[in-house]
Amino acid sequence: DVKVTQSSRYLVKRTGEKVFLECVQDMDHENMFWYRQDPGLGLRLIYFSYDVKMKEKGDIPEGYSVSREKKERFSLILESASTNQTSMYLCASSPTPTGNSPLHFGNGTRLTVT
Amino acid sequence: SQKIEQNSEALNIQEGKTATLTCNYTNYSPAYLQWYRQDPGRGPVFLLLIRENEKEKRKERLKVTFDTTLKQSLFHITASQPADSATYLCAPLRVGGYQKVTFGTGTKLQVIP
């Protein structure tokens, strides 16, 4: 089974801190994604990557950046955390870019910014 | 702009009945449509994928239909069980380019014993 592991289950940070959320997948997938999930708004795509060192903006990239130095690892960076970035963050991977293969999700990181 | 709509309210049904969840999309033509299940505090888990040239797909007690004319997919759970209680998400996807996978907001299903 594909395993997508997010480094922290819960995280509490202060406003203005730089925050790193880490995600590792063990199936050699090309594509990796970062979403945030908020009540009433559903899953919203922040960034995705279809190859090492490649990235594409999703629907809500403002305030975030990403890094993909190795195929298995995709990091989400909050340059200066703000309270409106309090959310559940979900990482996912998939083997192909074409939509005919499923996304495999991690169990999420619940980030609270105070 | 693209829009994906799922039943915004929770769906409560009696155990043993068939649950039907709706996914409507506008302003694009997906080649695939995926359905996921999400339990509280967990990431979504893939259930089924249906292609635009498939009208219906089944997997055990699950059935998905895809009507490209109506721009709608229906997700059915037959003989529902309390363990089916979860939020169900749909994700229509186009062909071509690198896929930004966009999800509906989900429908929360509660199966009452």
Image: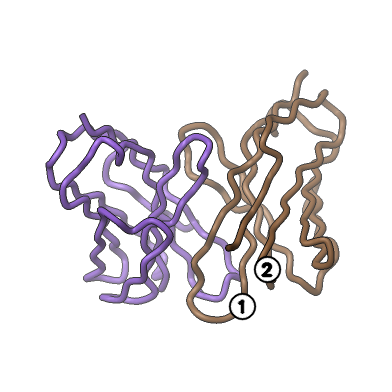
Chain colours: A purple, B brown
Give the mark nearest the N terminus, 1 or 2. 2
- Number of the label disc, if any, that sits on residue B30: none
**Residue A73, quarter of the rendered image:** bottom left
Q: Is residue B94 above or below residue B88?
A: below
Instruction: Judge left or right: residue B25 versus residue A58.
Output: right
The residue that appears at 47% across and 38% down in the rendered structure is: B42
Label 2 resides on the chain identified as: B
Q: Nearer the viewer, residue B28 or B79?
A: B28
What residue occupies the far bottom of the structure in this picture? B96
Q: Say what secondary structure mark 2 lies in.
A: strand
Left or right, B33 with respect to A71, comes to: right
Pick out the residue farthest to the left: A17
Q: Is residue B72 left or right of residue A64?
A: right
Q: Which residue is mark 2?
A: B32
Residue at the (34%, 40%) spot, across then down? A109
In the picture of the structure, the residue carrying the numbered disc 1 is B95
Count of numbered circles on the image: 2
Q: Is residue A44 placed above or below A114 in the rendered structure?
A: below
Kindly identify the amino acid type of the residue bearing the numbered disc 1.
Val
Residue type pointed to by label 2: Tyr
Image spot of residue B58 (x, y percent): 81, 56
Cβ atoms under marks 1 and 2 closer than 8 Å: yes
Q: Is residue A87 left or right of residue B111?
A: left
Residue at 48% x, 44% y: name it.
B43
> Are the numbered discs 1 and 2 placed on the same chain, yes or no?
yes
Residue B85 image point, x, y percent: 67, 30
Judge by depth and name the residue closer to the eye, A87 or A49: A87
Q: CA distance from mark 1 to mark 2?
A: 8 Å
Q: Quadrant of residue A81?
A: top left
The local crowd at label 2, few if under 14, some if 14 to 19, many if 20 or more residues have their Cα within 10 Å, is many
Q: Residue furthest top?
A: B113
Report in which chain the residue with disc 1 lies. B
